[in-house]
Amino acid sequence: TQLLEQSPQFLSIQEGENLTVYCNSSSVFSSLQWYRQEPGEGPVLLVTVVTGGEVKKLKRLTFQFGDARKDSSLHITAAQPGDTGLYLCAGGGGSNYKLTFGKGTLLTVNP
Amino acid sequence: DAGVIQSPRHEVTEMGQEVTLRCKPISGHNSLFWYRQTMMRGLELLIYFNNNVPIDDSGMPEDRFSAKMPKASFSTLKIQPSEPRDSAVYFCASSLWSGDGYTFGSGTRLTVV
């Protein structure tokens, strides 16, 4: 069974601060996705990374896929209250396209 | 497109009753997934379908759970009989088999008392 460990589990910061959250596994994934989930809603896809070492930017969010395709990080610059939510990473492997989700990092950005 | 539509949004039922959750995936998506989310276990994959055919139901917890996809535009997840430990948020998601990300519905919050 492929497992994804996310850290930290909880993070509370002030508006304007920078932060990084991590997603680690002992397994290799063919792709890794990041989702954000707000209360009462389903997760929403932010980005997909597929190549080891790949870096993608989405405005103030920077996503990196580890060289060995076993880990990933999400860095947020100058966090805003609108960034508050549960950040989930999900790994995919093989041809069956079944995603395994981490338990997430619950981020709170205080005004 | 209205996205993935789930119904009901909330369901409260008594232990032993049958519960049916419904999902309408995005038109054109050929894969459909049912997940359950709890604080303790996070998102757990229950079952997924490709072109209406169940591919992997190894995540279905017990025989009390069953899922069907009679047509490309509709799927159901049934729990019979329901138990308090089934209380969770159940999500349906759809995608293209090509590897694009999932689109999730808003979920059904199930409470079994």
Image (cartoon, rainbow, N blue to C red):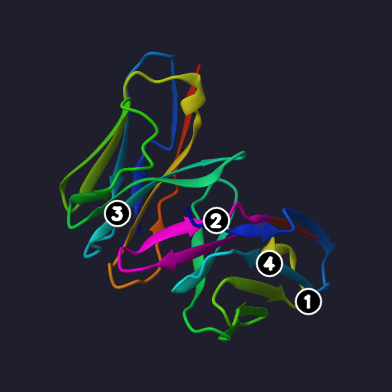
Which dot marks residue B32?
3
Between residue A31 and residue A34, name the one nearer to us. Answer: A31
Instruction: Say whether marks 1 and 2 touch (CB < 8 Å).
Output: no
**Chain of the residue that carries numbered disc 4 in the rendered image:** A
Mark in the foreground, 1 or 4: 4
Mark in the foreground, 1 or 2: 2
Residue under the image location 34 percent in, 18 percent down: B81
Dot 1 or dot 4: first in sequence order is 4
Q: Is residue A91 magenta?
A: yes
Cα separation between marks 3 and 2? 22 Å
User: In this picture, which residue range is highlighted in magenta?
Assistant: A86-105
- Label 3: few (<14), some (14–19) or many (≥20) C-alpha neighbours in 10 Å: many
Which dot marks residue A3?
2
Residue under the image location 22 percent in, 62 percent down: B30
Residue on which the image places disc 4: A22
Q: Is residue B2 left or right of residue B88?
A: left
Q: Is residue A60 above or below residue A83?
A: below
Instruction: Say whether marks 1 and 4 touch (CB < 8 Å).
Output: no
Labels 3 and 2 positioned on one and the same chain: no
Cα separation between marks 3 and 1? 36 Å
Dot 2 or dot 4: first in sequence order is 2
Cα separation between marks 1 and 2? 30 Å
Residue A53 appears in the rendering = yes
- Label 4: few (<14), some (14–19) or many (≥20) C-alpha neighbours in 10 Å: many
Labels 3 and 1 positioned on one and the same chain: no
Q: Is residue B66 left or right of residue A60?
A: left
Three-letter code, disc 4: Tyr
Mark in the foreground, 3 or 4: 4
Labels 2 and 4 positioned on one and the same chain: yes
* Circle 2: element type: loop
